[in-house]
Amino acid sequence: MRVVIVTESFPPDVNGVAHCALQTARHLAARGHQPLVIAPATATGEGSDAPCPVIRVPSLPLPGYPEVRLALPSRRVATAIAAHHADLVHLASPFVLGVRGMAAAARLGVPAVAVYQTDLAGYARTYMGAGEGTAWRRLRAVHSAADRTLAPSTAALRDLTEHGVRRVRLWPRGVDTERFRPELRDAALRRELAPRGELIVGYVGRLAPEKQVELLAGVCALDGVRVVVTGDGPSGPALGSALPGAVFLGRRTGPELARIHASLDVFAHTGPYETFCQTVQEAMASGVPVIAPAAGGPLDLVAHGRTGLLVPPGDAGAFRDAVRELGDPALRAAYGRAGRNAVLGRTWAAVGDLLLEHYTEVLDARTAVAA
C-alpha cells in the first residue's frame, strides 16, 4: 500500500501529532508498505529518523508561539501525492497543511483518512476568548470531506459527531511499554529532585496556557511535596513565579524522559482540552499513578480509584486534595501496578494494525462504489 501522511507537525518537533505521525510511518514501513511524509519545514532545517522520505513544505512560526510552524501555500503537496501514486492519504490533525492535502486527494480521486488529534476549538477559546465556531466550521469541512475520520477517544468521537462530522470511528494511541517501564526508577535522580525525600509530583508536556499547569500551585504549598515540571513553551517564564519551589527540567526526550517518568511518585496532568493525552499513558506504563481532569481523553485512560484519580477540570483545590490522598505509599503502588497492566496491550504495533484495518475498509468501500 502506498500511503502519503500529510501532517501538521513532525519530528524534530516534540508533540503528540508529530510523535503519532512518526509512529504511523514506522509501522507502515515495518509492515512492508510504502509511506511518504509531507510536513512543514522546521526552523532549524533539522531532519528526523523517519523510515521513509519526508517532503518539507515552507512554513512560518505561529505568532506568539514560535514552536508551532504553519505551512505556507505550496504546490508540493499535490505534486508529491501524485508522484507517489498514493493509494490513500492519511491526514494527521488536519487544519492548515491537511486542508491542502484533503483538497489534493479529492482532485486526484485518492481516498483520505483524517485523524482528529487537536482540540482546536478549545485552543481558540483559550487564546482568543472566542473563535470556537470558526474552528469547528473549518474542522467540520475537512473531516466531512474525508472518507473516514478517526477519533482518539470516546469524548473526541462524541464532540465530532455532535458538531456534524460524519463517518467517525475510534482509533486510540499506542505507547512504548519497553521504553516506559517502572524498572527505570532512579534513586539518584530522586535524591537530586527531592533531596529531603519529598513526594515527587510531576507534570510532563508543553508549557502553554491551555495546559493550565498553574493549577499545581496548591500542590507546591503542601508540606513534604516537590513539584517537578518537564517541558517547555511560552508559559515557562510565568510558571516559574506561579509554582514556587517547583523544579523545572526543560524539554527532555528519549530514555531521559522515560527515567523521569518512572522516578515520579505521582503524575499530574492539568489540561482539560486533551483529545487523548499521551503523557498519561506513558506515566501509566511507567507504573506511576495519575491525577487528571475528568474531561476529554483521560476519561478513557484513567480508571478512577483504580489507576489514578479524576478531578473536576480547572479545580486547583481538587488537584491538591488528590495529591494528599495519594500520600499513601500502598495506594500509589496499587494504582501504579494497575495502570501498567492496563496499557500493556496498547503497543504501537497493535494500534498500527488497527489503523491498517481502517485503511483496508476505506479502500474496500471505494472499490465497491466504483464497481
Image: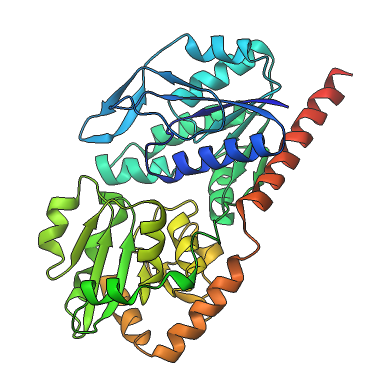
Q: Nearer the viewer, residue 273 or 2?
A: 2
Expressed as whole percent of the image width and height from the top left, the position of residue 149 reads 62, 37
In the rendered view, tell whether residue 214 sits above or below residue 274: below
Q: Residue furthest left?
A: 241
The quarter of the picture where the N terminus appears is top right
Quadrant in the picture for residue 97? top left
Expressed as whole percent of the image width and height from the top left, the position of residue 196 reads 18, 84
Q: Nearer the viewer, residue 106 or 328?
A: 328
Residue at 83 percent of width and 23 percent of height: 367
Q: Does 174 sit left or right of 215 as displayed?
A: right
Q: Residue furthest right?
A: 371
Q: Does 249 sit left or right of 85 as displayed?
A: left
Quadrant in the picture for residue 111? top right
Q: Nearer the viewer, residue 23 or 191?
A: 191
In the rendered view, tell whether residue 110 sits above or below residue 350: above
Expressed as whole percent of the image width and height from the top left, the position of residue 25 reads 58, 35
Expressed as whole percent of the image width and height from the top left, the position of residue 215 reads 25, 66
Residue at 43 percent of width and 11 percent of height: 74
Residue at 21 percent of width and 85 percent of height: 224
The quarter of the picture where the C terminus appears is top right
